[in-house]
Image (cartoon, rainbow, N blue to C red):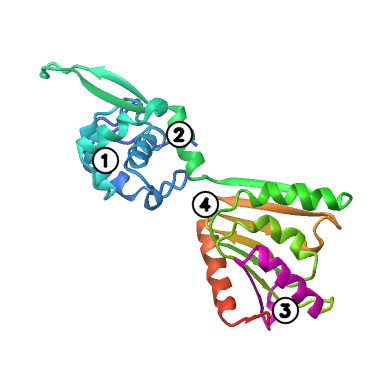
């Protein structure tokens, strides 16, 4: 569907950044296809983000002065100054394109800026926009699936790692070892068909090498229908129990980025509620 032509747009650029309609549209824009501005970590990221928004959301294909970028950021309630923007863009390297431009009433050339494809790739990678990876586990190569497939997933997860699986057993440790970088690493589970005393002995040995691991039993284990792993930056949906991964056909789906932030937040809240009322292994 073609975009509706706005009165402030001439087909190549926004003609007037002070136009009431433009300012209203920029202020209220949802911008789902861009990083959440609340998560932007540096002044450079804020500037690149704004240049990207202007290019791809407003079809503004002309380079911009630092003074104009200040005004645009202010409309989105992001505080900045012309000097801080110029300093940030000095460090941008090939993430922006620069051009000297001389207006008739200027005594010297001024630099204008436009985001490059490398700048967009930088933001997409840093804020992991809409990144989805699916790995199929065939069920015929259990060793390969446990020792090659899991590491591909585990290295993507950062910070705190929370694992939910209704069933536990000695096979869990073959998976948990790949998440030992979790700070902390928390495993919420419910029941087992194995000898619990043997599991506890193995757990204590494992914790000597991975002291960040804590395992708790959730008494209402029938509520643990789904298997998933939550970290600070990602969510993994697991199609089969982690203790038996590789023994049957299954899948792993990795979801990262702002588009899944709300889902991660909801699942983490539920995890924390259950974690608080669950019993640690003795």
Q: Nearer the viewer, mark 2 or mark 1?
A: 2
Nearer the observer: mark 4 or 2; the answer is 2
Q: Is residue 70 visible?
A: yes
95 lies above or below 34:
above
> Tag 1's secondary structure?
helix
Q: Residue at x 65, y 65 (%)?
A: 163
Q: Residue furthest right?
A: 140
Secondary element at image label 4: helix
Q: Which mark is residue 259?
A: 4
Distance between mark 4 and mark 3 Cα atoms: 29 Å
Q: Secondary structure at mark 2?
A: helix
Q: Which residues are magenta?
A: 197-225
Q: Is residue 207 magenta?
A: yes
Residue 272 vs residue 79: left or right? right
* 187 vs 226, nearest the viewer: 187
Tag shown at residue 120 = 2
Tell me which residue sits at (40%, 51%) in the image: 39
Say whether residue 239 is visible: no
Q: Position of residue 219 (x, y in %)?
A: 68, 83
Which of the marked residues, 1 or 4, is nearer the chain's N terminus?
A: 1
| Residue drawn 56% across the image and 50% down it | 256
Q: Earlier in the sequence, mark 3 or mark 2?
A: 2
What mark, if any, has residue 222 been given in the picture? 3
Q: Quadrant of residue 120?
A: top left
Q: CA distance from mark 1 to mark 3?
A: 52 Å
């Amino acid at each position: 569907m073609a975009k509706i032509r706005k009165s402030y747009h001439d087909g190549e650029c926004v003609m007037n950044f002070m136009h009431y309609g433009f300012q209203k549209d920029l202020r209220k824009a949802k911008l789902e296809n861009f990083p959440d501005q609340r998560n932007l970590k540096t002044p450079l990221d804020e500037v690149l983000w704004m240049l990207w928004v202007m290019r791809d959301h407003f079809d503004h294909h002309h380079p911009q002065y630092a003074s104009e970028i200040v005004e645009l950021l202010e409309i989105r309630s992001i505080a900045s100054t012309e000097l801080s923007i110029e300093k940030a863009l000095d460090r941008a390297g090939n993430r922006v394109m620069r051009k000297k431009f001389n207006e008739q009433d200027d005594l010297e050339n001024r630099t204008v800026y436009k985001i490059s494809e490398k700048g967009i790739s930088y933001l997409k990678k840093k804020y992991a926009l809409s990144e989805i990876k699916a790995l199929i586990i065939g069920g015929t190569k259990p060793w390969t699936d446990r020792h090659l497939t899991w590491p591909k997933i585990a290295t993507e997860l950062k910070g705190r790692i929370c694992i939910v699986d209704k069933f536990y057993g000695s096979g869990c440790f073959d998976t948990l070892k790949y998440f030992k970088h979790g700070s902390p690493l928390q495993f919420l589970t419910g029941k087992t068909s194995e000898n619990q005393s043997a599991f506890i002995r193995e757990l204590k040995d494992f914790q000597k090498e991975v002291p960040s691991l804590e395992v708790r039993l959730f008494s209402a284990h029938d509520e643990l229908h789904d298997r998933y792993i939550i970290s600070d930056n990602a969510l993994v949906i697991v199609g089969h129990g982690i203790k038996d991964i590789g023994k049957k056909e299954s899948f792993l789906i990795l979801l990262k980025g702002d588009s899944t932030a709300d889902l991660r937040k909801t699942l983490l809240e539920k995890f924390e509620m259950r974690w608080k009322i669950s019993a640690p292994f003795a």
